[in-house]
Image: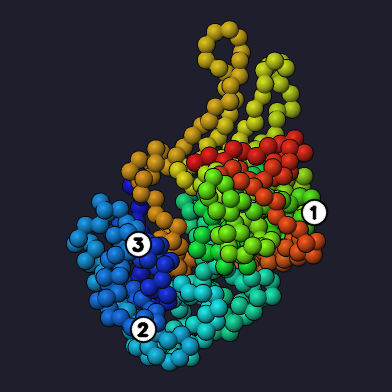
Amino acid sequence: MVARVIPVDPFDLVIFGGTGDLARRKILPGLYRRFRDGQMPAEARMIGAARSDMTAEAYRELARSALEDHVAAERRDPETVARFLGQLGYVAIDVHGDKGWLDLADAMRPGHVQAFYFSVAPGLFGTLAEKLHDHKVAGPDARIVVEKPFGHDLGSARTLNATLAAHFDEHQIYRIDHYLGKETVQNLMAVRFANMLFEPLWNAQFVDHVQITVAETVGVGGRGSYYDGSGAMRDMVQNHIMQLLCLIAMEPPNRFEPDAVRDEKLKVIRALDPVAPGDIVRGQYVPTNGTPGYLEDAGNPDSRTESYVAMKVHVSNWRWKGTPFYLRTGKRLRARSSEIAVTFREPPHSIFGESERWAENVLIIRLQPNEGIKLKVMIKEPGPGGMRLVNVPLDMSFADALGEGGNDIPDAYERLIMDVIRGNQTLFMRGDEVDAAWAWTDPVIAAWQERGDRPVPYDAGTSGPEDALMLMHRDGRRWREIRP
């Protein structure tokens, strides 16, 4: 099955921070793949903007190098690469001064979609918004794309939102969370709302619990100084995991439209109970078999920042009252794995007798690696000798189920940037969502800071702290094993 490609309208996309790491790793390669698949019109233009003095030709060579590093060789035929590079331009910009802004304004073409990607430090978001407005670079329908973090706490998030709102309307602001661009995350909505099979069971009466795991094998590495001021709670739970929780728990929107979807997500965040101290575990990886520990990576020998967090949360509404959601994320764990596991309750009565051990029905939505969906069900074990039950998976990996199209799933950034060009905000966070997420997160962080809690240590290459296992065991449950 080959995916349908729907071309977008002609556009001018300016990438502030166009020479930076995110642009080289994700944005430029993603744009090339969309170009290669025929989604970009020949009139599209992409303009890198950064403080470095370089010519447009030098920027094209930087982009060529980025494609060589981050796009598979079989997808880089010289003719396609040359045509893509021909649509790139560059303007040297002084964010705090006036240099380059008139040149950028002159490069904008009337009658084309205008988008501005803020691939820069969050402290520059407000300045860029102001400069775009003051120098009349952005037209009345222009769109801006801002990367996380959307503030450091509720106060800073509100300040940032107010700064952006002074120059752009909410419908022009695209707060990008790349997790929402993953194919499987969107398929979660399709599984729930396009099939009668699951939605009638999607409530506390039939669901025992839900697990959301985002595990990484890497440490904080070169991000040590940033991460030490953030931690797993701010870096992952407040945004990525919160969004996954919302998609799992939200009510069906009346239609698949931006505000309808985001209204339902906001209701979930506002229904979250405060987290009790005993329902959260914070961890910090320690040196193991030559691998440096968090303190060494962060360069702070007395850091109390968590590299791991596990918690039990409750959504207090009619659909989910009594069904716990277990969330965990961490660095230097056993394997890189992101998944959502919905575990259903046991049948009220077994007709097969006590000798036949029942195993849970679990719907597993795997985000990375090997995106796909798996449903574990009970069947009869083949062979004679009576009714013996066995738990087996009904497994659908995208690569197997969709053939060639499943092996070439667009990267999250590709999909989200094209949604910006289309003007579709469904997969982007709204300002009140960000506020609500911080309003729930801030008290959790403040509580452990007031107690002076230190994260518990865990060895690199494991599943995390032992205390996190007890978080589940005391409820008679267990975490799913973290596997590659």
Residue positioned 31% across, 68% down in the render:
63
Image side of residue 53 versus residue 441, left or right? left
> Counting residues from the N terminus, which is met first, the one under dot 1 or under dot 2?
2
The answer to which quarter of the image holds residue 87 is bottom left
Point out residue 447 in the picture as x, y percentages from the top left corner: 78, 62
Q: On the image, numbered disc 3 is attached to which residue? A: 29
Question: Considering only vertical position in the picture, is 288 above or below 33?
Answer: above
Q: Residue at x 27, y 72 (%)?
A: 60
- Front-most of 190 and 235? 235
Residue placed most toward the observer, 106 or 189: 106
Picture coordinates of residue 427, whole percent (x, y): 52, 61
Q: Name the residue under label 2.
A: 92
Sort mark 2 into few (<14), some (14-19) or many (20+) by Cα contacts within 10 Å.
Answer: many
> Picture quarter containing residue 115?
bottom left
Question: Is label 1 in a helix, a strand or a loop?
Answer: loop
- Taking depth in this image into account, of 301 and 303 the one nearest to the observer is 301
Q: Distance between the residues labelled 3 and 1?
A: 44 Å
Can residue 211 be seen here? The reply is yes
Outermost residue toward the left in this view: 79
Q: Which amino acid does label 3 sit on?
A: Pro
Q: Can you give x and y, in whole percent of width and height, for residue 234 in the image?
A: 63, 63
The answer to whether 324 appears left or right of 91 in the picture is: right
Q: In this figure, which residue is indicated by the disc labeled 1? A: 276
Residue found at x 39% / y 54%:
410
Q: Residues within 10 Å of mark 1 (few under 14, many from 20)?
A: few
On the question of residue 266 being in view, the answer is: no
Amino acid type of disc 2?
Ala
